[in-house]
Image: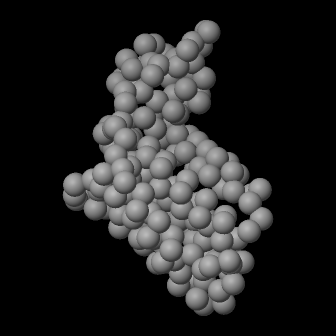
Amino acid sequence: MTTMPTTAPSRPERNGRLSADDWGQAALDLIAEQGVAAVAVEPLARRLGVTKGSFYWHFPSRDALLVAALERWEKVEQEEVFGQLEAIADPSERLRALFNLVAHEYKSHVIYSELLKALDHPAVQPVIGRVSDRRMEYLTASFRQAGLGRTDAQHRARLAYAAYIGFLQLNLQLHQARLQHDEFDAYVEHVMATLIPSS
């Protein structure tokens, strides 16, 4: 969502055998760059500078790697995004922190956008379903804590999530011109002022 450029993924520092997490992160990097269909053992082995044998030490198949990579993405999001917000007591301030955090987390958006394009894949659909349900539940609970009634909080959560996905579509799939830094910050402020109830 931001104007920051993507950079080539760095190779993990290896002090011996690669871990399953190294393979999972490399798969996520490849999804961000080329989509789910690009995840394959040989290109990942080349990227990591190892033979395919290292892969089969950890995973029985390419699909097993994809499942592990997606679960890693899901877990990191839950711990790093939602985990950072737990210490903020004021619900409106927590929502502002969430919107700001999400607005500037570029790589996660690219991965999410690529996963939305691959919803017909049996490994992708359940992860996207869980992530979307968790995001909606969190937004709804936060809007309720900020003073909205149950129905209004559900509507506001749906609107916020739709705005997020729509912005991804405009920028990453329809390739509309990206907002400059100041314009993007002003847009995020406008979204927050529109959607977050005043304390």
The answer to whether 62 appears left or right of 149 in the picture is left
Report the coloring of the rendering: one colour
Residue 169 figure quarter: bottom left
Task: Give the residue drawn at x 45%, y 13%.
Answer: 50
Residue 140 in the image: above or below residue 98: below
Residue 144 in sight from this viewpoint? yes
The answer to whether 27 appears left or right of 176 in the picture is right
The location of residue 192, given as percent across then percent down, is 51, 70
Task: Give the residue drawn at x 61%, y 45%.
Answer: 76
The location of residue 85, given as percent across then percent down, is 69, 57
Residue 145 figure quarter: bottom right
Residue 10 in the image: above or below residue 186: above
Task: Give the residue drawn at x 55%, y 15%.
Answer: 13
In the image, 175 versus 4, the foreground residue is 4
Residue 20 in the image: above or below residue 162: above
The location of residue 70, given as percent across then percent down, is 52, 46
The total of numbered circles placed on residues is 0
In the orientation shown, which residue stands out farthest toward the top?
Answer: 16
In the image, 32 versus 83, the foreground residue is 83
The C terminus is located in which quarter? bottom right
The location of residue 148, given as percent across then percent down, is 65, 86
In the image, 38 versus 170, the foreground residue is 170
Residue 126 in sight from this viewpoint? no
Task: Give the residue drawn at x 47%, y 65%.
Answer: 189
